[in-house]
Amino acid sequence: MKKLVLVFVTLVFVLSTSFGPNAGSVYVCKGPKSKRYHYDKDCRGLSRCSTKVYKVSLEEARNMGRTLCGWED
Ligand SMILES: [Zn+2]
């Protein structure tokens, strides 16, 4: 059980630091069904994208209402 707690705490720490301002760039697809952003431009979630893949800041992606890709959470 302790190991799980440690993993959880580490995850929260990693997430909270990566969600800070100017945390870097993410990739979004601008297709009509796209609701996600991706850290990896070769993500399998982007392989189905029907438009160009755009590189935007994490803040921009979140302002667009995007949430982290299900393959990367
Ligand atoms: Zn993804």
Image: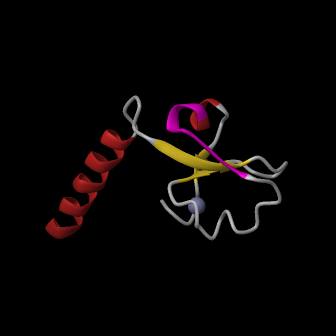
Residue at point 35%, 47% (across, down): 15
**Secondary structure, magenta segment, majority class:** strand
* Residue 41, horizontal then vertical, whole percent: 57, 60
The quadrant of the picture showing ligand 1 is bottom right
Number of numbered callouts drawn:
0
Horizontally, residue 46 falls left or right of residue 33, namely left
Residue 33 in picture, x, y percent from top left? 81, 52
Q: Which residues are magenta?
A: 53-60
Q: Position of residue 48 (x, y in %)?
A: 76, 67
Q: 8 left or right of 32?
A: left
Query: Who's the residue at 75% across and 51% down the image?
Result: 34
**Coloring basis for residues:** secondary structure
Q: Residue at x 48, y 59 (%)?
A: 73
- Residue furthest toward the left? 2
Where is residue 37 drawn, in percent x and y?
60, 49
**Is 37 one of the magenta-colored residues?**
no
The quarter of the picture where residue 44 lies is bottom right
| Residue 43: quarter of image | bottom right
- Residue 45, by quadrant, is bottom right
Horizontal side, residue 13 vs residue 19: left or right:
left
Q: Nearer the viewer, residue 57 or 35?
A: 57
> From what the image shows, is residue 42 above or below residue 17?
below
| Up-down relation of residue 67 to residue 42 (above or below) | above
Q: Quadrant of the N terminus?
A: bottom left
Does the segment drawn in magenta span residue 58? yes
Residue 13 or residue 20, whichever sits in front: 20
Which residue: 81% across, 50% down? 31
